[in-house]
Every structure is written in C-alpha cells, then in structure tokens.
Image (spheres, rainbow, N blue to C red):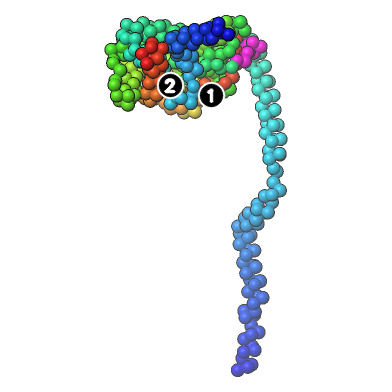
Amino acid sequence: MGANFESEYLMNKFFSKKLSIISFIFIPIIFLWNPNWLGFFGAQPYWPLIWLLPWSMIYGSINGLIFGLFLGLILDSLTLDDTFTQIPGLILCGFLFGRIRIHSDILVGHFRYGLICSFGSFLCGALNFFQIFLKNFSDLNDLILIPSVKNILTEVFLTGFFAPFICSQLLRMFKFSKGKL
Amino acid sequence: MLIIRRISTNRWWHKKKTWILFAVFLFLAFVRISKGSLYKDFYYFISKPFWPGQFQKEIVLESIDQEYLIKLNLLKKDNLRLRRILSLQESSNNDNMSAAVISRKTGSWWRQIILNKGSKDGVEIGDIVIGPGGLLGRVRDTSLLTSSVTLITSPESKLGVWVDRIQTNGLLVGLGDDNPTLILYSKDADIKMGDFISSSPASTLLPPNIPIGIIQSIDETLKSKKTAKISLLANPQVIDWVQILKVNI
C-alpha cells in the first residue's frame, strides 16, 4: 500500500515537473492535426509561437533560442517544403521572446501575448515569404506576392486571436512546473 | 306604349342568351387565335398530380448513369488500345489503392496531406494521388505506415498540363493559395474561361488525361506569357479518402 502511494507520488511529481516538456510534444501533433474548425481562409494559427512565448518568457532567451531551433527542426521534418525553413523565424522569436518580462497586470499581460505572438507570426511569415521569393526569383515573383501576403495576414490574425487564451494557461503551467507558483 | 315595349323586348340584341352565345364565341375565337394556350395551361394544372414522379426520374437517371459508364469503359478500352498502338504512356489501373487522409494542411504556406498508407503497403515516392474530381498531388515522402503528398496548390508543385480545347501544353504552378496558376508561354494562346485542364500527355511526372481543373480567370498583363487561375475539380480541403495510382512512366 505504502509503496503504491510512493510510486503514485513520484509519478505525479515527475509529471508536474516535466509538464512543460510534455506539452512540447503536442506542438507537432497539433501542427499536423490542423483542425479545420479553428481555421480561417484555410490558414491556422502558428502554434509553435504560442508555446514558445511562455517558454521563453520563463526560461530566458538562450533557452528560447534552443527550443526555437528544436521546434524548427521538428516542424521542418514534418513538412515537405524544401523552398523554405521555419528555423530562422523560430530561433529569432525564441530569442526575442526571452527578453520580454512578465507583466504585473494580468489583463494587460493577457492581451500583450496576443500582440507579441502576432508580431512573431508576422516575422516568421515574412521570413518564409522571403525564402520562397528568393527561391523563385526568376519567374513567379508577381504571381506569388498576393497569396503570400494573404497567408501572412491570416496567420497573424489567427495567432494573435488565440494566443491570449492559450499563452496565459501555458504560462501558469510552466510556472507551476518550474515551482514558481 | 305597351305595344312599343313588347316590340323592343323581342329584338335579338335585347336577349341575354344572344349575348352569352356571343361571349362564348369571342372566347373560342380567342382560344383559336392563341392556339389553345389557355387550354394547355389549364391542362398543366390539372395533370400536375399525375406527372411522372420521382421514381420515374430515378429510373431515368440510373439508366443514363449506366449508359455513361458503359460508354466510359468502351472509350477507356479504345484509348488504351490506341495508346498501345502509338506506344504512348499509359497509367495502369490495376495498381490503385485507397487511402484515408490522416492529416491535412491545405492553408497557409504548407499544402500537404498525409495518408494512412506507407511503404509497407507499396506506396512509392512519385505515385499520383487523385480524389473525387481529379488530381490532388504527388507522393513526396513515405514512411513505413504513412505517405506525405505535396498538393498541386503547394508552391513546390510544378506540373505539365494539357489544355484540351486548344491542344496546348502549359505549366501548372502552385502559389500557396487554393487556385494554382496555369502559365502558357505564348501570348497567342486562345484560352477561355471554362476551358478544361488535364495532365499533359507529354508530362514525365503524371500519366496522361487525369482531370485537374477548369480555367477560372485569365490574366493577360504579363508581357511574354499568359496566365490563368485554375479552379480545381478535386477539393483537398474536404476529401477524406483518396486513390493512390502507381505510375508506369
């Protein structure tokens, strides 16, 4: 009986400590799942940023940069496109997000997540676009411009819309697993 | 006075019956001039409940379907025979395989679907994926249990296509939106909205004659080429089951 309790306690402790890492596994899953009912014009929020923001805010720039790289590597392996990589955008965002401090006002902080994630999404989208643009420099420049701008804007809007809800919950979870709460 | 009144009531135009007969005559004359249109319209209403009903319609549609199916099979056989005579490319219909879509990225930058059949089931890189309507894309990558398909809407996708009406080859490029663009490297190409696009007989990537889409709009602003937006026949956003075709090119 005692051993049972102890193992359960240890398991709970392990899960609560590693909650942030466990949540990392869900990013590629939701990226692939891509639920249509969360979409807008076929686009989805840029999920990795929504996870990366609270992570970087709690663990700092270097950690953000490293996990941005990890996320980029995983997501690049899941997508087929050779024309662009998500790594530069996610590394840059991970590093920048690490320099942001948690706001004391909960409400302001709440909406700030949306704004920051929108900015991050714009940055990543723009970097993706420039990579595609350079790859197709010769023939498709004019044709590819409008769809790309549309893609960037929808993604910025959706990421900014969902970030406040999810980021605050993730932030609480990461704080809890780090033992700050 | 009395006598006068009596004479006047005896005049024919004072008789009600005469006027009724006259009215009937006028009505019949109108019917004659209008070639019985009133009768026909009247008949329309009274016969409406007895028209050939839904059941009859189903029988007719089923017969038409069967007729088309037989015609299609005959044409396919003809096509195959002629292709063999001319030693042209042919797609084998025996190696088709159904697969379910388990992940779908049809918006934003990534245009791909993941299927539940992989190298274990014999799927190979380069196989063609079609859905109800026509071409969806090509298998780009396989794992043991899954295969990833680059959709023709992806910026990665560039395919040779055939505009049937004007018998011209063109290049279909994905631009990262739902409508890929057809590029014809000739300003004189007489494409029109509604023209049908299929895979090119000259393509080295696709078997010929796979339906792809219809020209939705034409852009003639570029100097050296003509471009057109294509509305795809197969809709990757909603398709849950697809067919993987083995390519013998």
User: Which segment is the magenta one?
Assistant: B90-99
Q: Which mark is residue B238?
A: 1
At which x and y percent is residue A110? 34, 24
Can residue B20 be seen?
yes
Number of the label disc, if any, that sits on residue A44: 2
Give the residue drawn at x 69%, y 42%.
B53
Query: In percent of the image, x 67 and y 25: which residue is there?
Result: B69
Report if residue B120 lies within the magenta region: no
Residue at mark 1: chain: B
Q: Residue at x 62, y 89 (%)?
A: B5
Amino acid bearing label 1 = Val
What number is the disc on residue A117?
none
Mark 1: few, some, or many residues within 10 Å (few <14, many ≥20)? few
The foreground one among A151 and B9 is A151
Closer-to-camera residue (A103/A166): A103
Q: Give x and y (percent) for residue A83.
A: 40, 9
Is disc 2 surrounded by few (<14), some (14 to 19) or many (20+) residues within 10 Å? many
Q: Amino acid at mark 2?
A: Gln
Q: Are marks 1 and 2 in contact (CB under 8 Å)?
A: no
